[in-house]
Image (cartoon, grey):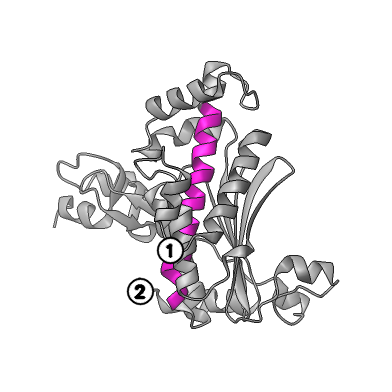
Amino acid sequence: MEIELAKKERLVRGMELGKRIVLHGVAFSQYYKSNLENYLRFCLEYYKKTDILPSALSLAYSLLEMAYKENCRNSYYLEKGWDPLSLESLTERESEFENNWDFSEPLRSRAKLKEEGSILRTTIQHSNTGITLEIANLAPITLEAEEALTEYLSRAKSYENLFEYYEDYPFDEEGRGIGIALAILQFKEIGIDPNLLRFDTADGEHIFRLEIGFENDYVSLRNKLENDEDIRPFRSHSEQEKEGETIFPWKLSVCKICGRTVDDRIFFHSVPPDVVAKAVDLPYTEEICAWCLSGYLKI
């Protein structure tokens, strides 16, 4: 994706200042995926580590799918009046949720999830030694679910091939839970330690934390904190420098007319009345791209 020069300079400045990249959302939609890919690619290009991108994206997508599914499950349980932390008829309830929730169109459930307070947040922290991805949501999960996830991650980190996954989870004939195991195998193939993937629950948030070191001698955040090290990714900056711009994600939207996913810089969420007056037979006045709008304007 080509970045205009002015924006690229701002992004580079943000990288130099050690700015975190934070993507906020609710639904794990194609827009969210595109934003994450664009920013992670830019970050890795900055450090000349683009070979890591496919594996990092694969694992990040799998973790986001899991976090999003937790949000959806919580929403479904609330709708049914069920306690999401109760183990009562857990197997039957999970099966009902899986069969009735529509995962094909994430944006359809966005308003409902947002109203319920759901979040889907990805934070990219970076330095010249490595990057850290944190994926957070607010859905409560049972202690048993946390234990099952701990066991799954432990097993996945030890796999040498995918056959081992199916030996451990023969009931998953469709491979719904194989994404994390596959991504971890990809990490091993390019020499990245998968043991720096952890999860925790803090202040009501369920957080996955993935650290990717650029070199073999990478020291994890946990070890740095235990050793009382200074964990700032860059040198200290002046207050003037610290007040520099924060990096914001690219915003993408879908045109109602042509169906293209386009950058918001060429997208009209609402066409101004004076422009509508100059258009002939314009089918929509909201959520259309500049390409389509130009075709309806009078010459």
Seen as rendered, the residue at the extreme top is 81
Dot 2 alpha-carbon crowd within 10 angstroms: few under 14, some 14 to 19, many 20 or more: few
> Vertically, is 81 above or below 165?
above
> Vertically, is 86 above or below 105?
above
Residue at 41% from the left image edge and 41% from the top image edge? 170
Residue at 77% from the left image edge and 79% from the top image edge? 238
Answer yes or no: do the residues labelled 1 and 2 have beta carbons within 8 Å?
no
> Residue 185 at what x, y percent from top left?
46, 64
User: Which residue is under mark 2?
Assistant: 2
Front residue of 247/113: it is: 113
The verdict on residue 58 being magenta is yes
Front residue of 285/44: it is: 44
Residue at 70% from the left image edge and 70% from the top image edge? 220
- State which mark lies toward you, 1 or 2: 1
Question: Which region shows up in magenta?
Answer: 51-75
User: Which residue is under mark 1?
Assistant: 37
